[in-house]
Image (spheres, helix red, strand yellow):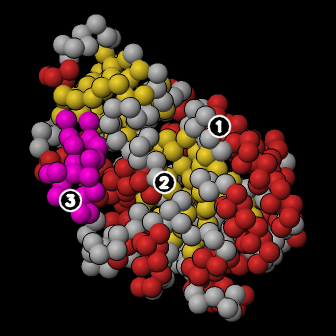
Amino acid sequence: MKAIRAAFLDFVGDPFFVPESESVRYLPDGLLVIEDGMVKDFGAFETLGAKYAELEVVSYQGKLILPGFIDLHVHYPQTEAIGAYGEQLLAWLNKYIFPTEAKFRDKNYAREIASFFLDELLRNGTTTAVVLTTIFPQSVEVLFEEAQRRHMRIVAGQMLMTRNAPDFLINDAKTAYAQTKAQIQKWHGNGRLLYAITPRFAITSTDEELALAGKLKAEFPDVYVHTHLSENLKEIELTAELFPHSKDYLNVYEQFGLVGDRSIFAHCIHLDDSAFERLAEVGAAIAFCPTSNLFLGSGLFKLGKAKSVDRPIPVGLATDVGAGTSFSMLQTMCDAYKVAQLQGESLSPFQAFYLATLGAAKALTLADKLGNFEIGKEADFVVLDMQATPLMALRNRGGIPQTLETLSEQIFATTILGDDRAIAATYVAGTRVSEQLF
């Protein structure tokens, strides 16, 4: 066993629907007890200190500990192409992304980027991620191998693409089906790893491929489906041309059995009321990608509509690197706030952190394992330094807050001013990751 002492923030309810005084759990001086990578006990130090007096306590005095961040949608093959200039979605893919993804035919290159990518997640406090790969099976294998070596919880799968891409990124639908099936059998539920059936988006799949994806989902109902939905207006127009018998973009996936409570749809910017209602009915999740949506000029996600009281949809935050401009979930929260502001809405700091922790865990149907410090959950967490830079220290001076009001002010300033420098340490399954990352 080991014990960690610090200030702790996590969530026991959804602050979009439950008052923050009831949904936010804040311990200005708390103790987290870990055994075999799991939360054994958690509470105020005043209450638990004597009970665990024999344990050596690691103290993060003046720091704030939160559950590990969960990134609901990120492309690891696009790591090297982050910050590519001047295009919107479809042109950006053809000019920058497809040539970059072609490099993953080389297994050594794929491993190099997978290793860098996972370390970059950890350096930014992200301990769980839903990851897109490429059409090359080796790009999936090395990602899972490197994630397993780091004991990370990763959801990923081979990219399915059979048309509307360069020849070097086209796969045969039946071949991709067989490759995906073999990977599911090898990796899904292997340690902390989980599998996602991953059509890139509707326009790069034929009816045959989507039908085979639906067949895989029927054969393995507990795997995920992970894809894009309604990101860009030209993409939506092309989808309508390619699938004239579908009533809308979401219906393309519905017709092939790919929409359910383990389906994760990235972006969802241009959905109408009917699509929101249908997602809510089945419990499908949305990955909100604010830095990417702003960078590519795709549009503004209607978070308020997705989190409406009458038809709530599970939502989590996502960096969407490489259209997304940062691996930092803090920077992602910063842009999420701006997206809400541009639509006359407010995203509270507690709501933002919820979307990166317990909210994302619920979107993944993993709230029994991740997302807060409930006893029996996996001990993934991040140590946040809210005074990491001179400006942050000036803005957040006064030490660890004693009230929710002061805490709200400080964590909001941290999302606006913070980045990877604010991550003092990251723990995966109760173990601190390499000091070399920081």
Kind of residue sitting beneath label 2 = Leu
Q: In the image, which residues are magenta? A: 8-27
Decide if residue 296 is on the left or right side of residue 376. right
Name the residue carrying label 3. 18
Decide if residue 436 is on the left or right side of residue 200. left
Reply yes or no: does residue 23 show up in magenta. Answer: yes
How many angstroms separate mark 2 from mark 1 (CA)? Answer: 17 Å
- Asked whether the viewer can see residue 291, the reply is no
Name the residue carrying label 2. 364
Q: Are marks 2 and 1 in contact (CB under 8 Å)?
A: no
Q: Helix or strand or loop: what does disc 3 sit on? A: loop
- The spot of residue 261 in percent (x, y) is 50, 62
Kind of residue sitting beneath label 1 = Asn
Task: Please state which of residues 395 and 224 is positioned toward the viewer in this rendering.
Answer: 224
At 19% across and 23% down in the image, what residue appears?
Answer: 45
Task: Please state which of residues 215 and 209 is positioned toward the viewer in this rendering.
Answer: 215
Earlier residue among tags 2 and 1: 1
At 49% across and 32% down in the image, what residue appears?
Answer: 428
Name the residue carrying label 1. 190
Label annotation for residue 241? none
- The spot of residue 54 in percent (x, y) is 28, 7
Q: Helix or strand or loop: what does disc 1 sit on? A: loop
At 46% across and 21% down in the image, what residue appears?
Answer: 36
Circle 2 packing at 10 Å, graded few (<14), some (14-19), many (20+), is many
Circle 1 packing at 10 Å, graded few (<14), some (14-19), many (20+), is few
